Image (cartoon, rainbow, N blue to C red):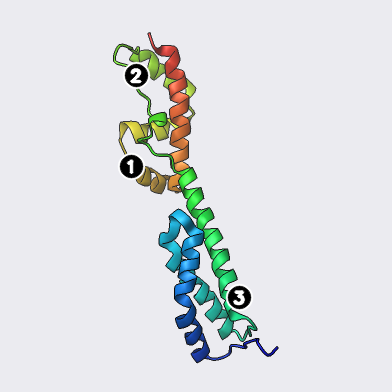
Amino acid sequence: MENSIVIDTADRFEQLYNSHYQRLVAYASARLGEYRDFSEDCVQEAFVVFHSKLKNGEKFEHPEAFLYRTVDNIVKKQRSKRFAEESAAVSLDDENNVIELKSDESVDYEKYIRLLEKRLTPEEKKLYFAKYVQEKKIEEIAKEKDLSVAAVTMRLSRLRQKVKKELDDLII
């Protein structure tokens, strides 16, 4: 154990922070790819974990290895989180999520309203009304319904698909 280092002082923690911070940021940045803006956050979180363990009396033979593993784990969580957020959030401006009619097509709006009344669930009607009649923002709807923005976005996407399918039958 000649090469092993046992950390138990604040001075040693500061030395590790000063000597490894920039390298860990570069490592995190390379691992995060398009999400590299979060690399400093990941490294700072790793040092918080490390400091917390030191305060609780834990000893480290290879503190650098612990820091790199911790950064790696935090980076993986950060990438998963960002990917999940992007996957769940559907842009309302996305051309695949817009209900549009060509100018030469017409809809019998009375039939359309009756169809919506019959085919939408009460919850879908409320969501439709809030978004398309009252023109509320997704964030506002999410807050009112105590849901995440991603959940409301997904429900709106499904609602648009359902309404679009129903509209196909009404086009004259």
In this view, the residue farthest toward the right is 1
Query: If the image is split into quadrants, where does the N terminus sit?
Result: bottom right
Q: Are marks 3 and 1 in contact (CB under 8 Å)?
A: no
Q: Amino acid at mark 3?
A: Ala
Question: What's the residue type where badge 1 is placed?
Answer: Lys
Mark 1 surroundings within 10 Å by alpha-carbon count, few (fewer than 14), some (14 through 19), many (20 or more): few
Q: Can you give x and y, in whole percent of width and height, for residue 121 in the image?
A: 49, 28
Q: Is residue 71 left or right of residue 4?
A: left
Residue plotted at (65% across, 84% down): 61
Q: Residue at x 33, y 42 (%)?
A: 137
Q: Nearer the viewer, residue 43 or 138?
A: 43
Q: In the rendering, at what x and y percent does residue 114 appear?
A: 41, 17
Which mark lies nearer to you, 1 or 2? 2
Give the residue number, with chain letter if any, for mark 3.
Answer: 65
Q: Is residue 117 visible?
A: no
Q: Is residue 78 visible?
A: yes
Tell which circle, 1 or 2, labels the residue nearer the N-terminal end.
Answer: 2
Classify residue 94 by image quadrant: top left
**Disc 3 packing (10 Å; few <14; some 14–19; many ≥20):** few
Q: Residue furthest front?
A: 3
Residue under pointer 2: 101
Whole-Å distance between the Cαs marked 3 and 1? 46 Å
Q: Is residue 41 above or below residue 155?
A: below
Mark sitting on residue 137: 1
For label 2, the SS is loop
Q: Amino acid at mark 2?
A: Leu
